[in-house]
Image (cartoon, rainbow, N blue to C red):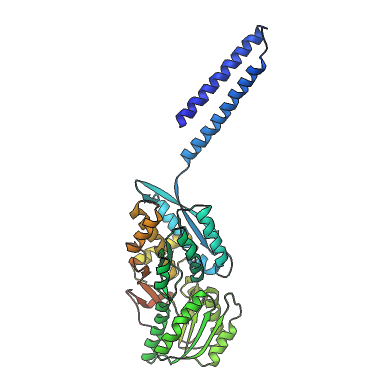
């Protein structure tokens, strides 16, 4: 096509030269002025030349534009979920794009395509997230979409993501009835296990401490009134009852609540031996701070999302020692250590000790599935994810009925690291210990 356009341009230039020479000769010899029809012909030739030049420019531009793999991302950049997303979610997008593009892109057939992110802010709400997913699928026409941030937003976005045939690798959410969910939306994949896995993890950890005589039997419970907290408390209540614990205090609070002091004072008044909060990052920090201010010296203090952040250990320093939190890792694992170092170098911040490597692992799975299929065929990539085994920063993993069975459920802060103390299918867990008093 470019050769044809070049030929057309040259042809039109020659036509204009011919007309100009002819006109110069006739005027110089005082023979005839140009007639109206001849002037029109010259203008048409000139206009044709301009069109040819424009087409040439467009063709050359298209040829020069690099083909990319467009990945759509929608998560929180504003609103109450921003703290968690900016610590766990967005840095891993940056790191993965850096790593993939540095090696030349994702291999699709005989060529490598660099990744191009198309990002939107969900403003910490499911309504905005659904709008973003719609826009990514129909306006931006991205090749694949990264699962959103948090349980509630993933649950809300799942039907729309399924409608457009994208795989949904959920690395920052969980729920109890995942088998039913997966049956309805078989393109969804769950990397943090079930909510009941996590609640059973903390119940089992407290049972271990109680059976060793390190803590008493009275437990205080609190949960954020959002999908994550509701799913957690739903499975935690019967688990505590089955384990024989006495729940002496239970409360919930709306997401975004600023004053959490009444929760700590309620737990203190109930004389609980252990405090368990299924909380989000701002609440996790606020509850820990209030517990110190009010002197809630329980023998086991557990917080939810955000308790695994490196910033938690920095914020509370020695006070964090012995605190239990959702997540954990094996700090001796080579793959995690390498990932952690690369994360710091590329993003300028430290990853957490739980969801950060899981988010990155979800992107590695997508990348490896695309390369295995060798195309952008979403249905084929989804099938490859459901049946494949993947080498990731959390180890060699595969799904069983779209649910990952390799999950850290509880970690405990020890010398600035959230060492895993309970989990499913993981190696390197330490025994939990009684928490020292705040000092």
Q: Is residue 20 above or below residue 410?
A: above
Choose between 37 and 339: the one closer to the eye: 37
Q: Is residue 86 above or below residue 23?
A: below
Residue 26 x %, y %: 64, 9
Choose between 245 and 324: the one closer to the eye: 245
Residue 327: quadrant of the picture? bottom left
Q: Is residue 374 above or below residue 76?
A: above
Residue 12: quadrant of the picture? top right
Which quarter of the rendered picture does the N terminus lie within?
top left
Q: How many marks?
A: 0
The reply to whether residue 412 is visible in this rendering is no
Residue 154 x %, y %: 48, 67
Residue at (35%, 60%) from the top-left corner?
383
Q: Is residue 207 above or below residue 412?
A: below
Choose between 298 and 371: the one closer to the eye: 371
Residue at (43%, 67%) from the top-left corner?
171
Residue at (65%, 8%) from the top-left corner?
28
Compared across the picture, whether 7 is left or right of 23 comes to left
Compared across the picture, whether 189 is left or right of 37 comes to left
Residue 265 x %, y %: 57, 88
The reply to whether residue 98 is visible in this rendering is yes
Residue at (52%, 89%) from the top-left corner?
249
Residue 220 x %, y %: 50, 88
């Amino acid at each position: 096509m470019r050769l044809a356009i070049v030929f057309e341009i040259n042809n039109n230039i020659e036509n204009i030269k011919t007309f100009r020479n002819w006109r110069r000769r006739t005027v110089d010899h005082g023979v005839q002025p140009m007639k109206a029809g001849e002037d029109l012909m010259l203008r048409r030739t000139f206009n044709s030349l301009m069109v040819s030049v424009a087409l040439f420019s467009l063709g050359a531009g298209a040829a020069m534009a690099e083909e990319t793999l467009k990945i759509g991302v929608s998560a929180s950049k504003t609103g109450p979920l921003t703290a968690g997303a900016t610590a766990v979610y967005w840095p891993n997008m940056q790191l993965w794009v850096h790593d993939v593009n540095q090696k030349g892109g994702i291999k699709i057939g005989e060529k490598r395509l660099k990744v191009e992110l198309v990002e939107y802010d969900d403003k910490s709400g499911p309504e905005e997230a659904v709008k973003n997913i719609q826009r990514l699928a129909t306006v931006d026409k991205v090749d694949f979409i990264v699962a959103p941030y948090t349980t509630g937003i993933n649950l809300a976005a799942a039907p729309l993501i399924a409608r457009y045939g994208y795989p949904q690798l959920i690395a920052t959410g969980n729920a109890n009835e995942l088998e039913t969910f997966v049956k309805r939306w078989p393109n969804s994949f769950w990397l943090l296990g079930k909510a009941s896995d996590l609640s059973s993890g903390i119940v089992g950890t407290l049972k271990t401490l109680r059976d060793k005589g390190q803590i008493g039997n009275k437990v205080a419970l609190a949960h954020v009134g959002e999908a994550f907290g509701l799913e957690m408390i739903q499975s935690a209540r019967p688990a505590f009852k089955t384990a024989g614990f006495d729940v002496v205090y239970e409360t919930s609070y709306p997401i975004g609540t600023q004053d959490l002091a009444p929760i700590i004072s309620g737990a203190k008044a109930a004389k609980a031996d252990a405090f368990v909060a299924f909380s989000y990052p701002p609440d996790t920090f606020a509850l820990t701070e209030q517990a110190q201010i009010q002197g809630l010296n329980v023998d086991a203090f557990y917080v939810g999302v955000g308790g695994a952040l490196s910033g938690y250990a920095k914020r509370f320093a020695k006070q964090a020692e012995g605190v239990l939190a959702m997540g954990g890792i094996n700090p001796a694992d080579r793959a995690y250590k390498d990932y952690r170092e690369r994360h710091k170098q590329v993003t300028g911040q430290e990853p957490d000790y739980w969801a950060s490597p899981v988010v990155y692992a979800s992107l590695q799975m997508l990348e490896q599935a695309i390369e295995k299929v060798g195309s952008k065929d979403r249905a084929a990539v989804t099938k490859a994810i459901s049946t494949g085994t993947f080498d990731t920063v959390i180890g060699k993993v595969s799904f069983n009925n779209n649910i990952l069975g390799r999950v850290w459920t509880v970690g405990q802060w020890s010398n600035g690291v959230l060492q895993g103390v309970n989990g499913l299918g993981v190696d390197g867990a330490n025994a939990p210990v009684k928490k020292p008093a705040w000092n």
